[in-house]
Amino acid sequence: MPKRKIPTAAFDAKRTVARKKRTVKRAKVASSTKKAIPCPEDGCDGVFTTNQSMQTHVGNVHKGRKDFACTEEGCQKKFSKKHHMQRHIDTVHHGRKDFACTEEGCRKKFSKKQHMQQHVNTVHHGRKDFACTEEGCQQKFTNAYNMKQHVNIVHNGRKDFTCTEEGCQQKFSFKHHMQQHVNTVHHGRKDFACTKEGCQQKFTAASSMQQHIETVHNGRRDFTCTEEGCQQKFSFKHHMQQHVDTVHHGRRDFACTAEGC
């Protein structure tokens, strides 16, 4: 009886390679025979290899289905895909930032690669690739969102944020402007105290506090009278304009309210 040949390591390697080639070939054949299933939604060019993937696409993209709710307590966010939900948890709730800036010496980290790349392009390379689409406007922006926001607010005059206080009809272009209005006008909050020792002044916004320091404590006067030969300087532009109107142009807009005067 002939002895059975014991496979060598080289023989096993060749057999493994042959098996892999057959697997790849079968996968290609199967792929080529799969039906191309188009999305049934009007105007959508999506094509899918299985009915399940097509149905998932329709539910998520066209029907707005969001079956994956955030598992963190108190969070109401929902997502169309499980990995989107998991990414939300990792970045928003757990603070994961896996993408470090690639520029030498910069320690900034980001939760998404696209955010890191945008940071590199705009902060380090100064790129502004998104030009305003309105004719005659030369403004450029670092991302499409900011450009669209500029068009809506500056050119189209959109104010989507209405004051939340009852009876107030004020509208604002930005949510933080509306919230600032509520805090300062309706609730009287002044959260920004002057940082100069001994000064008790408080302000509704950080910019107002900083302006106070520059003009009152540091004596900055950036607005020079525009009339030729006048060297007067002012802390505020409206003070300079008031000076021009009254001193140089002789305007007297306020008449005495006393009878007979």
Image (cartoon, rainbow, N blue to C red):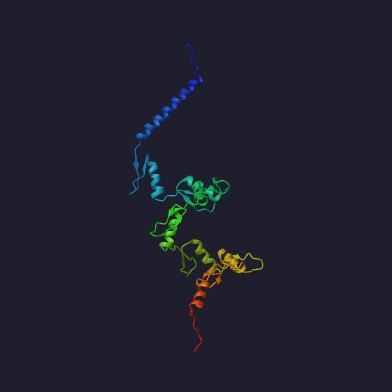
Residue 9 appears at what percent x and percent y? 51, 21
Location of residue 50 with respect to 91 vertically, above or below: above
Residue 115 appears at what percent x and percent y? 50, 49
Q: Nearer the viewer, residue 37 or 255?
A: 255
- Location of residue 57 (image quadrant): top left
Query: Which residue appears at 48% of the width and 22% of the height?
Result: 12
Q: Quick one: which residue is furthest to the right in this view?
A: 198
Residue 112 appears at what percent x and percent y? 51, 47
Q: Quick one: which residue is furthest to the front in this view?
A: 229
Query: Which residue appears at 46% of the width and 25% of the height?
Result: 16
- Location of residue 35 (image quadrant): top left
Query: How many labels, in total?
Result: 0
Query: Which residue appears at 42% of the width and 27% of the height?
Result: 21
Q: Quick one: which residue is furthest to the top in this view?
A: 1
Q: Nearer the viewer, residue 159 or 259?
A: 259
Location of residue 6 with respect to 86 vertically, above or below: above
Q: Nearer the viewer, residue 111 or 27?
A: 111
Q: Nearer the viewer, residue 189 or 4?
A: 189
Residue 36 appears at what percent x and percent y? 34, 39
Query: Which residue appears at 45% of the width and 26% of the height?
Result: 17
Q: Does 198 sit left or right of 19 as displayed? A: right
Location of residue 80 with respect to 230 vertically, above or below: above
